[in-house]
Image (cartoon, grey):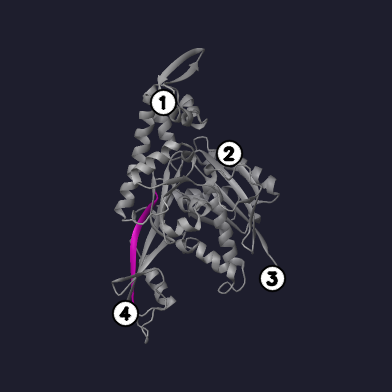
């Protein structure tokens, strides 16, 4: 029986509302055990996924990092791989096609042919002030007519590989890399990954990846979405809107301090109010009681949430990615706790929507299984997958590695493509 080997893996999840650090023990039998966790408020250092205050963010991350290291009894640089999320308003996703003529004597597509077509797809004119973050492999077309997800070995004269290229702002990626350096994290062990795909791997079931679904992370400052069907990512995006905008709308519309509106949303009172038959919402300021019609609050909330899902729908339809979404929607982030988001999703996309929660989580879990930490857990799960793929022997034949390859086949070359 082969000896089970272990590696430490780590994750830094940087968000508009909170920063999280998570450590896990990655075992070569595909087990992942959580051993350390730390969390701190972003305190305004991040806005819509973009860093505003480097020094403040470093201080907050240091607090979270110290707590996680103390719980796990390891240092961040003991991790074989540390994954860090990338998001924000500078993210963009552009379809690209790479072609190659099959020149082999038997005219059968080889792995070299496929890789050449993939490289041609990545020879895309870089958008101004952008860095290539990674590539989602979508599907292939043989002889301009036959669509397939497995072209290797088939006879053909021509192969087209369709991809979705990920780009992020040059300065935004540099800022994150500088932040890692300031924290003393060794650069050669860090992988930068789009936030939206992280939660997908932490919370989606096998059937949802295969049968088609829209995965949504409705956070504080941004909303990220990814459409997946038959293990292929067909669309992705970042909307510069989130639950903070709902809070701001309530503050402006009701003429109330932001703190009161934030507490209304984050305490769960808004959820209770929208689900109840109460005619008024009552609150007290300086010993004075006020009453606001529940209908007014509902109109304000619905208007902003409707905008978020309509904008998402426009982008998904633009990429013709709305077809065959049999598994419906999966919602994580703080917005997943508000049932009104599920209702508006169902009305917008005419399919079901569920709350996403961590799948297969073991170890020192605490509250990590809740939807607010879907991205954090997904980041760690991806670090685990990378660790297994790089450390296991005979990776072309090892059954555990084959499962890992299937797990990460949708984001090829992400690990190696982050270059400035």
Question: On the rendered structure, is 112 left or right of 101?
Answer: right
Q: Reading the chain from its start, which is encountered first: label 2 or label 4?
A: 2
Q: Reading the chain from its start, which is encountered first: label 4 or label 1?
A: 4
3D distance between C-alphas at marks 3 and 1:
60 Å
Residue 40 is marked as 2
> Would you say the residues marked 2 and 1 are in contact, meaning their CB atoms lie under 8 Å apart?
no
Report the magenta stretch's main SS: strand
Residue at image location 35% in from the left, 46% down from the top: 350
Q: Secondary structure at mark 1?
A: helix
Query: How far across and how far down the image is residue 32, in percent?
Result: 62, 56
Residue 157 is marked as 4
State the residue position of label 3. Answer: 2
Magenta region includes residue 234: no
Front: mark 3 or 2:
3
Taking the image as drawn, is residue 131 in sight?
no
Q: Reading the chain from its start, which is encountered first: label 3 or label 2?
A: 3
3D distance between C-alphas at marks 3 and 2:
40 Å
Q: Reading the chain from its start, which is encountered first: label 2 or label 1?
A: 2
**Region of the chain picked out in magenta, as a range:** 90-101
- In the image, 74 versus 290, the foreground residue is 290
Residue at image location 50% in from the left, 42% down from the top: 15
Q: Quadrant of the N terminus?
A: bottom right
Figure check: 303 above or below 197: above
State the residue position of label 1. Answer: 251
């Amino acid at each position: 029986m082969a000896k089970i080997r272990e590696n430490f893996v780590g994750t830094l999840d940087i968000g508009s509302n909170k920063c999280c650090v998570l450590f896990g023990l990655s075992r070569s039998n595909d087990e992942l055990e959580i051993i350390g966790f730390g969390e701190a408020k972003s305190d305004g250092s991040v806005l819509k996924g973009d860093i505003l205050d480097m020094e403040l963010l470093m201080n907050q991350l240091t607090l979270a990092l110290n707590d996680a290291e103390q719980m796990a009894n390891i240092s961040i640089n003991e991790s074989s791989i540390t994954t860090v999320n990338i998001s924000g308003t500078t993210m963009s996703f552009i379809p690209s096609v790479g072609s190659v003529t099959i020149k082999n004597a038997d005219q059968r597509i080889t792995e070299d042919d496929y890789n050449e077509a993939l490289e041609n797809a990545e020879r895309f004119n870089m958008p101004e002030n952008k860095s290539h973050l990674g590539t989602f492999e979508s599907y292939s077309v043989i002889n301009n007519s036959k669509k397939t997800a497995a072209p290797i070995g088939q006879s053909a004269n021509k192969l087209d590989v369709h991809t979705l290229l990920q780009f992020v702002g040059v300065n935004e990626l540099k800022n994150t890399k500088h932040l890692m350096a300031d924290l003393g994290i060794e650069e050669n062990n860090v992988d930068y990954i789009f936030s939206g795909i992280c939660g997908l791997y932490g919370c989606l079931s096998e059937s949802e990846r295969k049968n088609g679904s829209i995965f949504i992370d409705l956070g504080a400052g941004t909303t990220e979405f990814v459409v997946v069907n038959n293990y292929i990512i067909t669309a992705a995006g970042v909307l510069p809107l989130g639950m903070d905008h709902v809070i701001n709308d309530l503050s402006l519309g009701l003429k109330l301090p932001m703190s009161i509106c934030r507490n209304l949303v984050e305490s769960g009172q808004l959820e209770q109010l929208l689900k109840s038959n109460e005619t008024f919402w009552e609150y007290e300021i300086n010993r004075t009681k006020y009453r606001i019609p529940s209908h007014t609050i509902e109109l304000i909330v619905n208007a902003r949430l409707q905008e978020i899902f309509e904008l998402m729908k426009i982008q998904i339809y633009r990429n013709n990615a709305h077809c065959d979404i049999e598994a419906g929607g999966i919602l994580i982030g703080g917005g997943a706790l508000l049932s009104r988001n599920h209702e508006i999703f169902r009305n917008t996309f005419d399919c079901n929507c569920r709350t996403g929660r961590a799948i297969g989580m073991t170890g020192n879990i605490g509250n990590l299984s809740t939807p607010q930490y879907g991205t954090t857990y997904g980041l760690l799960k991806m670090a685990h997958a990378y660790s297994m793929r790089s450390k296991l022997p005979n990776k072309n034949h090892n059954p555990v590695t084959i499962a890992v390859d299937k797990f990460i086949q949708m984001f090829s070359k992400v690990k190696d493509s982050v270059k400035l």
